[in-house]
Image (spheres, rainbow, N blue to C red):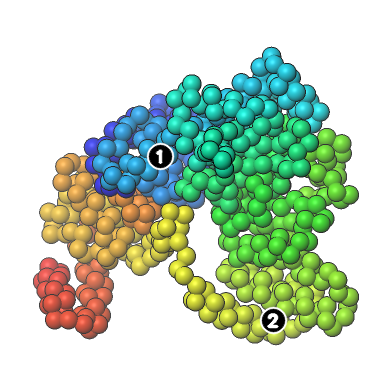
């Protein structure tokens, strides 16, 4: 995204009601004018410690320390970058982001066209289902047969594609939808002879697939006419609908703030449990549960249970996919199986205790994969034991968290009667092999092709955090530091220096406002650091006195900065770089004298 002016960001911030935004995720209680409290959405807690200051447009949790402005809240709650948070809030505020490159404008216009066409198609399918026509009656009868009530069907936006080759095409023409957009979405097909457009979904119950914001991005259709293709799905559209990044029903599930998510396969396996109050059910859209889906789930819960039937769970492809989840931090993944080939929606309707028992007896992911690796082998035979141990070692080598690794290693050692030291040695070898394998692969990229970021606050010293927190909290602190010859160049290059520069820039036009400082920052590392420090601000603390200690603190920062410059001077490969670094080193030395 091209650089957006500070005035535009301030306009967005002023138009977005912080309390209304947060209330979509948190139940807030007003304790005094402009002062709201609730339970933090970022960590588990019993007593409310999440504070929203409506007048300042800031939030802060006194439990986990997270804090910031409306942009930071969206970044944290939705797990997106600043650019995406800015776009979402601009749309909410009705602000047009004009400073965009031609490529960005074209991408945004395409996205708007895809979004509009998807929403209108969903509207069309719903109109057909609830219409007083033979097609609508047929669809409603199919829902009654599956035990789906009208209010549930409307909540999930279910619809019906009529048995007509041109119904949606005609609707789109009447509503001004470009037919090529419907083709791109996979809602219209094109005949091989003559290129005639036709409706792709016909005589099917339609399930709109929504992102976690509740926006329609795709469709699934279940046949009503006995077609051998029981389910059909609209195609993936890059940067709009990629099924490995979404979970069906998550937009409904997250509203209930469940403690865990239960991942199933089918649409009815989500809809029917929700109708019976089991709002933790979501579906993986026909894929094995992916790493991207695990990271999406991690925004809302700490535990996921993958609910399979017996045959599905043991499939080799499923096991390979599950193995990739072992190393995911911050999310406990378990596996459960329903007996007797039951589907979750059948279990909910016929005998919920069977479902509860299966979920309560869910296996730890590592233990489950080890058990499955023994299939077809005599468990007590040397071959079976060695196969299981080798599988365990490969899995354990994926776990980065040392505490979790210790716990899993202890269980595997006890299970097979092996010394832990032997397992540790084998795990070390497996880790080396995995690192070599990763090094040979192309560098991993994010969803839009961007390289992953380095840790947000890496290299920021405690002294720098201490001072930056004070400069954010004391409205005139930065101005006093500037009067004493301070500046951003004293701070370590990176997040700390960029945050300091934003604070001093803000101080040039008046008292420092943490929300405005955060608005000046666009890179994720500096914004993360700023948000962290905002969350640490103590309203009872006298930060003005803290800032008065700038002189002594400056000496420590300067000493640390000069030492770093000396290392860079020694490593410099050209005279020009060496001269520039020497000049900066000399400047710092003179200023701290």
Q: Residue 387: image x %, image y %?
A: 77, 78
Find disc 2 in the rendering and name its residue.
Answer: 423
Seen at 62% across and 80% down, the residue is: 430
Q: Is residue 9 visible?
A: yes
* C-alpha distance separating marks 1 and 2: 53 Å
**Along the line of sight, the residue nearer the viewer: 574 or 560:** 574
Find residue 155 and report its image quarter: top right
Considering the image in quadrants, where does the C terminus appear? bottom left
Q: Residue 112: image x %, image y %?
A: 42, 35
**Along the line of sight, the residue nearer the viewer: 552 or 303:** 303
Q: Secondary structure at mark 1?
A: helix
Q: Residue 114: image x %, image y %?
A: 46, 37
Q: Is residue 45 visible?
A: no
Seen at 30% across and 60% down, the residue is: 496
| Outermost residue to the top | 132
- Tag 1 near tag 2, CB within 8 Å: no
**Along the line of sight, the residue nearer the viewer: 290 or 401:** 290
In the visual, does 111 lie left or right of 433? left
The disc placed on residue 136 is none
Find residue 126 and report its image quarter: top right
Instruction: Using the image, determine if residue 179 lies above or below residue 149.
Output: below
Return the disc, 1 or 2, that comes first in the chain's sequence: 1
Seen at 41% across and 62% down, the residue is: 451
| Outermost residue to the front | 193
The disc placed on residue 110 is 1
Seen at 83% across and 81% down, the residue is: 383
In the visual, does 180 lie left or right of 483? right
Q: Secondary structure at mark 2?
A: helix
Q: Residue 478: image x %, image y %?
A: 21, 51
User: In the image, which is nearer the foreground, mark 1 or mark 2?
Assistant: 1
């Amino acid at each position: 995204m091209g650089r957006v002016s500070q005035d535009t960001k301030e306009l967005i911030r002023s138009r977005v009601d912080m309390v209304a935004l947060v209330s979509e995720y948190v139940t807030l209680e007003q304790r005094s004018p402009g002062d709201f409290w609730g339970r933090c959405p970022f960590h588990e807690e019993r007593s409310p410690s999440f504070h929203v200051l409506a007048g300042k447009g800031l939030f802060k949790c006194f439990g986990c320390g997270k804090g910031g402005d409306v942009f930071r809240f969206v970044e944290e709650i939705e797990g997106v970058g600043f650019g995406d948070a800015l776009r979402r809030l601009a749309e909410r505020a009705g602000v047009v982001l004009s400073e965009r490159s031609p490529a960005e404008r074209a991408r945004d216009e395409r996205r708007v066209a895809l979004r509009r066409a998807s929403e209108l198609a969903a509207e069309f399918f719903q109109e057909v289902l609830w219409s007083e026509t033979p097609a609508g009656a047929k669809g409603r009868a199919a829902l009654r047969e599956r035990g789906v009530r009208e209010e549930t069907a409307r909540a999930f936006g279910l619809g019906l594609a009529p048995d007509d080759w041109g119904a949606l095409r005609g609707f789109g023409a009447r509503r001004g939808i470009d037919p090529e957009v419907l083709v791109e979405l996979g809602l219209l097909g094109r005949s091989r002879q003559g290129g005639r457009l036709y409706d792709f979904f016909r005589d099917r119950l339609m399930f709109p697939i929504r992102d976690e914001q509740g926006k329609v991005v795709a469709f699934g259709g279940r046949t009503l006419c006995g077609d051998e293709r029981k389910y059909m799905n609209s195609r993936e559209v890059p940067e709009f609908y990629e099924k490995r990044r979404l979970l069906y029903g998550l937009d409904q599930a997250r509203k209930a703030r469940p403690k865990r998510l239960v991942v199933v396969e089918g649409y009815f396996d989500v809809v029917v449990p929700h109708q019976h109050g089991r709002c933790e059910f979501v579906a993986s859209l026909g894929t094995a549960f992916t790493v991207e889906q695990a990271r999406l789930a991690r925004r809302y819960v700490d535990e996921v249970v993958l609910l399979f039937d017996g045959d599905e769970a043991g499939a080799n492809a499923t096991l390979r996919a599950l193995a990739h989840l072992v190393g995911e931090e911050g999310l406990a993944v378990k596996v459960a199986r329903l007996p007797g080939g039951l589907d979750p929606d059948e279990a909910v309707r016929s005998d919920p205790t069977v479902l509860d028992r299966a979920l309560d007896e869910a296996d730890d992911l590592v233990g489950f994969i080890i058990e499955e690796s023994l299939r077809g082998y005599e468990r007590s035979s040397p071959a079976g034991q060695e196969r299981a141990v080798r599988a365990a070692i490969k899995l354990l080598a994926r776990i980065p968290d040392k505490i979790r690794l210790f716990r899993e290693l202890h269980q595997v050692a006890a299970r097979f009667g092996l010394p832990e030291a032997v397992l540790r040695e084998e795990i070390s070898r497996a880790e080396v092999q995995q690192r070599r394998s990763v090094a040979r692969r192309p560098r991993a990229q994010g969803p839009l092709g961007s390289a992953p970021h380095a840790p947000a606050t890496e290299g920021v010293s405690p002294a720098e955090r201490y001072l930056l927190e004070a400069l954010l909290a004391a409205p005139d602190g930065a101005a006093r530091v500037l009067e004493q010859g301070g500046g951003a160049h004293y701070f370590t290059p990176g997040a700390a220096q960029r945050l300091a520069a934003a604070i001093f820039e803000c101080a040039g036009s008046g008292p420092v406002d943490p929300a405005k400082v955060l608005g000046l920052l666009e890179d994720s590392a500096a914004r993360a650091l700023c948000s962290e420090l905002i969350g640490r601000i103590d309203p009872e603390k006298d930060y003005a006195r803290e800032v008065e200690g700038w002189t002594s603190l400056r000496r420590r920062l300067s000493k640390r900065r000069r030492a770093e410059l000396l290392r860079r001077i020694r490593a410099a490969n050209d005279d020009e770089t060496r001269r520039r670094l020497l000049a900066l080193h000399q400047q710092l030395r003179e200023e701290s004298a």
